[in-house]
Image: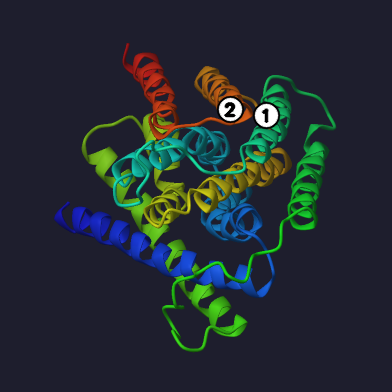
Amino acid sequence: MLLTVILFFLSAIAIYLACEYFVNGIEWCGRHMKLGATAVGTVLAAFGTALPESAVTFTAVAFGTTPEQKDIGVGAAMGGPLVLATIAYAVVGLALWANRRKLKRGDAMVRVDHQRLAQDQISFLAIFIFKVALGLVAFAIKPWLGVLFLAAYGLYVWREITTAETAPEEEELEDLKLRPHNATMGWAATQSLLALAVIAVASHTFVAQLEHIGTFMGISPHIIALLLSPVATELPETMNALIWVRQGKERLALANISGAMMIQATIPSALGLFFTPWRFDNPLLVSGIVTACAIVLLWNLFRRGNVDARTLASIGLLYLVFAGYVGWHFYG
């Protein structure tokens, strides 16, 4: 058990340090590709950090030999969006509030492209509602609908790239950590890929140790799958957000979360449809309802164009609501 605890903390530290290198490298990749902050966050950073949890879903649904193992994959496909829509956004709000004096943000207002983020919430919500609705019915051609989710993500990436603003050359970036005086595209990509590899290994270790700790403490496997594992698998996005907000770049942080949410709404859903019956029990349905509520609240906040850190942080309370329901469902 001592080794498990040590690996738990070491893997968390490794994820944070690797994310420092990843966000630094991916910003330089975006600069060389002439992409603005929004596209860097929604496409480059989100795709990279979403790979580990997508791999978890794929392994569970494609190679799982028992219904329980396949259920873990479906739970990850539903738990990821819930964590991103609640905890990840809350982390941005809390980090901005905590660093408001350092960033000289007395009002702690979130400085982003509000209308673009509002549009992202609507796009995500439409896909997510369709995804949840499919979990309530059964029909012969349902597995083939996974192709629609892959196409939806491809369309989203195309829109983000083609409508992205060009990165201003005068925007100051920190020196590339791996090669401070030679920040070429090759070195930036190398640093990003190496950091991503560390994130993937450390994330896998973190999730495994969390499951061991949960089992040791007598926590139900269902609670681990629904509550703890999704938080662990979304840790890279949350760490990225924390790092970027500390640098005063909440635009990148929120774009990363928004892009990761779109991946979680499409890629894992497609995998689940391809390899499982994709049927939801009550906890999964409730997780979908709570996620949809969070998205509606976020859409309303960004639509008004006036979001402060404390309001954004309060979105995280919805995750506590879901946690309370899960505890009541299994132990009530």
Residue 13, labelled with which disc? none
Q: Identify residue type, mark 1.
A: Leu
| Element type where label 2 sits in the image | helix
Residue 295, labelled with which disc? 2
Q: Is residue 17 above or below residue 324?
A: below
Residue 92 on image: x %, y %: 42, 42
Q: Is residue 290 left or right of residue 91?
A: right
Q: Is residue 84 left or right of residue 259?
A: left
How far is disc 2 from disc 1 in space, using C-alphas?
7 Å
* Contact? badges 2 and 1 (CB < 8 Å): yes
Residue 303 on image: x %, y %: 63, 28
Q: Quadrant of residue 116?
A: top right
Packing grade of label 1 (10 A; few <14, some 14-19, many >=20) is: many
Packing grade of label 2 (10 A; few <14, some 14-19, many >=20) is: many
Residue 318 on image: x %, y %: 43, 23
**Residue drawn at the location 52% of the way across and 43% of the way down:** 111
Task: Name the quadrant of the C terminus.
Answer: top left
| Element type where label 1 sits in the image | helix
In this orientation, which residue lies closer to the viewer: 225 or 180?
180
**Residue drawn at the location 83% of the way across and 29% of the way down:** 140
Chain-order first, disc 2 or disc 1 = 1
In this orientation, which residue lies closer to the viewer: 195 or 114?
114
Residue 156 on image: x %, y %: 75, 47
Q: How many marks?
A: 2
Which residue was labeled with disc 1?
125
